[in-house]
Image: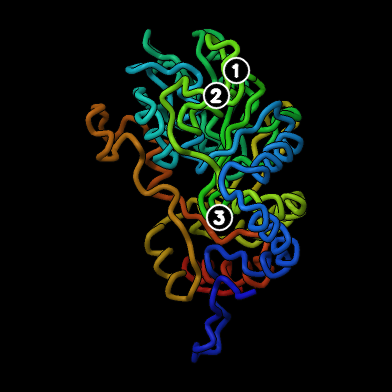
Amino acid sequence: MLSQVQTATDRTDAGPPPVPFFSQARTFDALWPVLERRLSDVVSHGKYSHGRTVAELEAALAAWTGAARVVGVNSGTDALVLLLRACGLEPGDEVLVPAFTFVASASAVTLARGRPVFTDIDPVTYGMDVDSAAAAVTDRTRIVQPVHLFCQLADMAGVRALAARHRLTVLEDSAEAVGMRWDGVHAGLLGAGGVLSFFPTKTLGAIGDAGAVLTNDERIADTVAALRHHGRAGRTIDNFPGISNATVLAGVNSKMDDIQAAVLLAKLAGLDAQIARRAELAARYTELLRPCSGVRRLPTVVDRGVPTRAVFYVYLIEVDRRDELAEHLAAQGIGTETYYPVPLHLQPSFAHLGYREGQFPNAEAACRRTLALPLYPDLADAAVDTVCAAIRTFYDGRSA
């Protein structure tokens, strides 16, 4: 199988090889015999969308997460839109969303005809700040939607208590939270439902876009299953007893491709080992970067008072002169990503909501300072050493 990332064979210097921000070339090389069999099975059966391989993946993910139902769709964004709709969001209903997250967390609310209402974040975990969320509740608030970012869950005890006080529905944007758990419960199952993204860089990644809704509520699952397939109800849902395979809702075409399901099934067997490898790499980063003068904050997994499972999807640091550091690393062939350059309340697409700079200081500070370093199971220890040496050189003028 051809590698996905070309090696820099034309480098003329004697320095270390480049470190891409993401690569799964070695994973796919090792996985190819299993993957080839699964892809051949999809082709031989001639069902490429919404077929038996998707159903097999849904069952496997339900078993792995402990969810009563998993419904595969074509992206994590669509999963969130359909989940919001399935939970009864009406035009103008307000949804609490943290201001520091990927834009889809809020644009999904808009696409579901709701109104995103932004909150600040906890500066350590980057999750929703519950006090900020409480201050944003109005008589139009219907849903509180925490986002689990980078390596750990948001404060779900606080979120659930807030929801109980105000009779709000809890939906989790758990797109990044594959494998994360709270007191044994998988992310996305601590409220009415959650979502998973299988974008290629995610902890469990496809070779294109794919996503899923997970829930313990059969009605929600049935509604999402209908919405993803043009509103066709393969199972009976409320108010339509005895009707199946009929168009009962205004749905969309968001079916998962069986090829993506085949890839995800092939990778699922080794997922726990890959999560463990991510933890090893994160620990190595922390050990090497802790003494570095320009690094303001390293990832900190917060003790919530209950057993939790952190999963390092991203290794995010806060640094001085973030953009200069990114340029310095790029010049040495080291890839980075900025999560996220502009807080949502200051994005032009949400200007009509009337927010202004300074309203959510923790979110704004995170957007100025955070930088994601390469972290994926194929990454070698030596590559982590290279990245850390380059960061130390930038701030301290030394490489060791």
Q: Residue at x 28, y 34 (%)?
A: 350
Percent coordinates x, y for residue 279 in the rendering: 70, 52
Q: Residue at x 64, y 20 (%)?
A: 218
Q: Residue at x 65, y 74 (%)?
A: 1
Q: Secondary structure at mark 3?
A: loop
From the viewer's perspective, tell me whether residue 23 is left or right of residue 332: right
Q: Which numbered disc, 1 or 3, marks the residue that appears first in the sequence?
A: 3
Q: Nearer the viewer, residue 46 or 112?
A: 46
Work out whether 358 lies above or below 240. Answer: below
Determine which of the numbered discs, if any, sits on residue 233 in the image: 2
**Residue, disc 1:** 236
Q: Are marks 1 and 2 in contact (CB under 8 Å)?
A: yes
From the viewer's perspective, tell me whether residue 151 is left or right of residue 226: right
Label 1 is placed on what type of residue? Thr
Percent coordinates x, y for residue 140 in the rendering: 37, 11
**Residue, disc 3:** 200
